[in-house]
Amino acid sequence: MKNLVIAIDGYSSCGKSTTAKAVAAALHYAYLDTGAMYRGVTLFLLENNIAFDDMPRIEQVLHDEIHLSFKRNRRTGRNELCLNEVIREDDIRQMRVSNSVSEVSVIAQVRHAMVAQQQRLGRKRGVVMDGRDIGTTVFPDAEVKIFMTADVEVRARRRQDELTAAGQDVPLPDIIENLRKRDHIDSTRAESPLRRAADAVLLDTTHITITEQVDFVLDKVSSALFAAYAHKING
């Protein structure tokens, strides 16, 4: 069976990561949370008091001091982000990181470094990646491209539930403001803006369950695999 690249792009808190993880598990594919990588860079800059406009310093730390990887948590089965060999999954989900990650993501040097890592990790294919520019920049030749969206208030409630479960009490209006700010920055940045690829299938998750989202993506994967098989048979 041909190994595919499955690109799942879209706005924050649409269910991208949860869906991508489930699809990867169903297909026995690798899963790569590209958003976590940008969060890892953001966390490092915040913790080391590096200004987001200090380009020489940012270039230096990207080259010499920031090492990102993923480690599978045996207890939960999740791939968790490691920053310099230390698992920082909970730390990168804090609101202070959420409030800054879009500002860091617009930095060209950061995007170039992350895209290069993502392309290297996905080179062997058989991978599900979720993010904001997977189908447009990282893997424009991905066989399956999904673009996810949802109503901002629904997304905010989902995000609030995640934060509450992690012990963070954040008012809903603050989360809505954060999401709208990130949407604007991500969609208008000069470097790899968030946009739907011309050949991406739109998936609105406002009124559907995670199971329905996963089934939707798996159906598109089945169609892509059938098309690849038919092409091979027909020469």
Image (cartoon, rainbow, N blue to C red):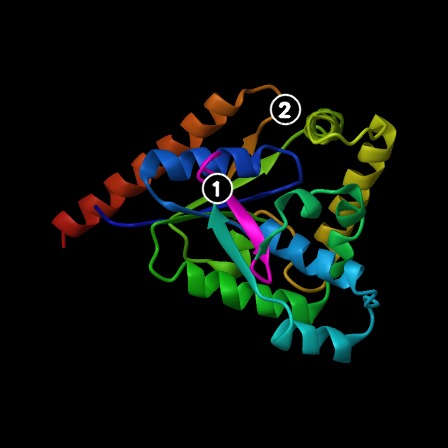
- Residue at x 14%, y 55% (from the top left corner): 235
Q: Secondary structure at mark 2?
A: loop
- Give the residues drawn in magenta, as a range: 74-85
Q: Return the x and y of residue 222 as percentages of the image width and height.
A: 30, 35
Residue 74 in view (yes/no):
yes
Q: Return the x and y of residue 154 as percentages of the image width and height.
A: 71, 24
User: In the depicted view, which residue is nearer to us: 146 or 161?
Assistant: 161
Q: Is 80 within the magenta?
A: yes
Q: Return the x and y of residue 90 as percentages of the image width and height.
A: 66, 42
Which mark is on residue 219?
A: none
- Confirm or deny contact between disc 2 and disc 1 (CB under 8 A): no
| Left or right for 109, reference 118 | right
Q: Secondary structure at mark 1?
A: loop
Residue occupied by mark 2: 206
User: In the depicted view, which residue is nearer to us: 181 or 67?
Assistant: 67
| Left or right for 202, reference 186 | left
Residue 168 vs 107, above or below: the answer is: above
Categorize mark 1 by other alpha carbons within 10 Å: few (<14), some (14-19), many (20+). Answer: few
Residue occupied by mark 1: 73
| Left or right for 192, reference 106 | left
Q: Is 78 within the magenta?
A: yes
Residue 74 vs 61, above or below: the answer is: above
Give the spatial CA distance, label 2 vs label 1. Answer: 30 Å
User: In the depicted view, which residue is nearer to us: 227 or 221?
Assistant: 221
Nearest-to-viewer mark from 2 and 1 = 1
Q: Residue type at mark 2: give it.
A: Thr
Question: Which image quarter: residue 152?
Answer: top right
